[in-house]
Amino acid sequence: MPKLTNTDNTCYLCGRQAFYISYNSKKPRCEEKINRCPGFIAKAQESRDRNTTPEQRREHMKRMSINGNAKLSELHNDSNWYAKKSENISLAVKARGGHQGINNPMFGKTHKQESKEKQSNRAQHRDHICYQQATLTKIENGIAVSKELKSEKDLYNESIDRFTYLSWQKHQNIINPNGYKRGKEYELDHKISKTYGFIHNIPPAIIGHYRNLELIPKAQNRSKRVKCSISLDELIEQIVKS
């Protein structure tokens, strides 16, 4: 799609600044893909509301979902198609120089607060049967293990991981004040180790608390293994003060 070199044009559908011009109609538009334009989306919605009822729309989407899933299932059983798809993905990642840092399509981008709230609300009101079915599918495909087959320690560590994830998301500036890059050189460490917590029956919320987390060099973390770099009393005192 040709890009416009000047900033005087506006999108013919929504009135925003235009950055592209259509091949065929030669009309300026704000998005390279026209179905991303707010004006196009609003126009399409008006057409749907005018020509179909909500019930008809739901029935149509249900049919599309059934047909689409059936086609995907057929393709995923085609080893040639699957191999070609994997090859295309690998080539695309290689062409852009990898998937780390600025080469990641999501680098520097964040979801709007409105989108985050919408996703959170949708997840909270989603039927729990969906999650149960997803888990069963993973177990059937051999990429997950049922809770009945997991050891107490595995379940304990999973619970810690959930608290650790939330701590990292909400308190990253406290855990990592120096702004080290987590990955090859630095790893997230539990000052009181998971193993110590399991042996001494310490609640997972304490082991996964942000006051028990720090980013340290990878070599240091590996040599530390199951040792603790802080006492439980010291940790509890820090948690109480936080």
Image: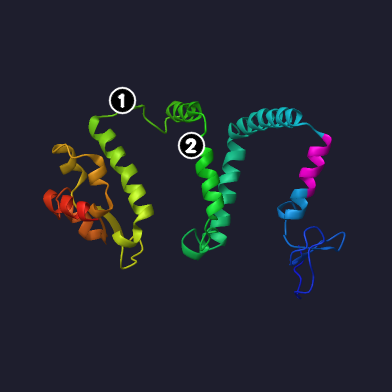
Q: Secondary structure at mark 1?
A: helix
| Mark pair 2, 1: CA separation | 28 Å
Q: Residues within 10 Å of mark 1 (few under 14, many from 20)?
A: few
Quadrant position of the C terminus in the picture: bottom left
The span picked out in magenta is 43-51
Residue linked to disc 1: 149
Q: Indicate whether 189 appears above or below 103.
A: above
Tell me residue 127's x, y (percent).
51, 29
Q: Which residue is mark 2?
A: 124
Instruction: State the SS at label 2.
Output: helix
* Residue at x 45% of width, y 31% of height: 138
Q: Nearer the viewer, residue 125 or 37?
A: 125
Viewed as shown, does residue 11 lie left or right of 95?
right
Instruction: Answer whether residue 50 is magenta in the image.
Output: yes
The N terminus: image quadrant: bottom right
Q: Earlier in the sequence, mark 2 or mark 1?
A: 2
- Cβ atoms under marks 2 and 1 closer than 8 Å: no
